[in-house]
Image (cartoon, rainbow, N blue to C red):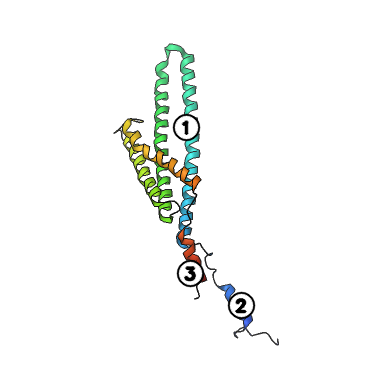
Amino acid sequence: MEGSPLAGEAGPANAATANTNRPEAAPVGHSARERRTRQIIEAGTRGASFVFRHRAGNAAILVLILVAASRESANAGSAAPSVYAAPAALVMAARDSLGSVAVLAFGLGGLMYYSVFYRSRLVPRWLSAWGLVAVASVMVSILLVMFGRVEAFSAPQLVLALPIAVQEMVLAVWLIAKGFGPSPRPAVAVAKALAPA
């Protein structure tokens, strides 16, 4: 064929088709660190959603079992209250244990989110550092409750859990008022992509 370059020749047509075999570069503004950060956020969201759905479902089931046991105890009269005492105590203990596990799951999700916020600087670092310390504090408080060192909803536990409550409110107000700050990372990626090779 006249006018078409052969397979071995380097012509303009071959130069254009040769580039199609190369792997595509990452989209502009999406560095490897940003992709990892996005993956961590997505994994944390899926995990939190899973824990919340199952925690809510388990709590509803336990409450329904407790209501059924109390109705049966009331219908049986005073002759058989001890028969229903053990299952009711078991259901209450399961509810308390599930609550503790849910708070630990919240803490793990919070550690992921606040570490991502700290690294990406989407919110001020002081706010994300406060979140990291507060989440660690609430996890310590629930571990103390789980191991019987303090009572649930006692003053020491509430004092340890108070920082996360305040921090979450401050973060909410910050996000409503200011939103996420611009991340310096996409600007660097764009500058590198536009720089001549």
Amino acid at circle 1: Ala
Q: Are marks 1 and 2 in contact (CB under 8 Å)?
A: no
Sequence-first disc among 1 and 2 = 2
Q: Which mark is residue 192?
A: 3
The answer to which quarter of the image holds residue 159 is top left
The answer to which quarter of the image holds residue 170 is top left
Q: Secondary structure at mark 2?
A: helix
Give coordinates of residue 124: x percent, y percent: 42, 51
Give coordinates of residue 20: x percent, y percent: 59, 73
Decide: few, some or many residues near mark 2? Use Cα within 10 Å; few <14, some 14-19, many ≥20: few
Judging by the rendered image, the residue that carries numbered circle 1 is 59
Q: Secondary structure at mark 1?
A: helix
Q: Secondary structure at mark 3?
A: helix
Identity of the residue furthest to the bottom in this view? 2
Sequence-first disc among 3 and 1 = 1
Give whichever of 71, 164 is nearer the camera: 164
Amino acid at circle 3: Lys
Q: CA distance from mark 2 to mark 3?
A: 23 Å
